[in-house]
Image (tube, rainbow, N blue to C red):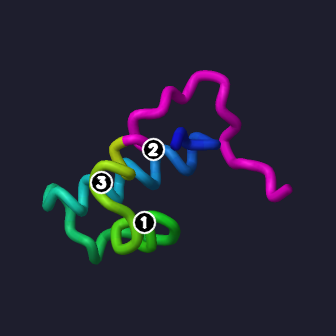
Amino acid sequence: MPAKSKAQQMAAGAALSAKRGEKKKSELKGASKEMVESMTERELEELASTKRKGKPQHASKS
């Protein structure tokens, strides 16, 4: 499942880093904090590896 925005891609990268033990879970904020608990490492890798080119900074709410 590819990321829909740059913000989502960056949050997934932060959550993946915490899941791998490279970053403390207590340092996470917002969406990345929820992602680390609810998603597998493979799912986070898929989101984090999405290309940023052409993605909006934030996804629309619709």
Figure check: 55 above or below 10: above
| Tags 2 and 1 touching, CB below 8 Å | yes
State the residue at coordinates (30%, 70%).
27
Figure check: 23 above or below 2: below
Task: Say few, some or many: other residues with alpha carbon within 10 Å of mark 2 (under 14 / 14 to 19 / 20 or more).
Answer: many
What range of the chain is rendered magenta?
A: 46-62
Query: Which residue, given by chain and number where applicable, does mark 1 sit on?
Result: 35
Of 22 and 51, the residue lying toward us: 51
Q: Position of residue 46 (x, y in %)?
A: 40, 41
The quarter of the image holding the C terminus is: bottom right
Q: Residue furthest right?
A: 62
Q: Position of residue 52 (x, y in %)?
A: 54, 29
Say which amino acid is labelled 2: Leu
Residue 8: give its label: none
Secondary structure mainly formed by the magenta segment: loop
CA distance for labels 2 and 1: 11 Å
Query: Which residue, given by chain and number where applicable, does mark 2 sit on?
Result: 47
CA distance for labels 1 and 3: 9 Å
Q: Secondary structure at mark 1?
A: helix
Residue 16: give its label: 3
**Quick one: label 2 or label 1, which is nearer the N terminus?**
1
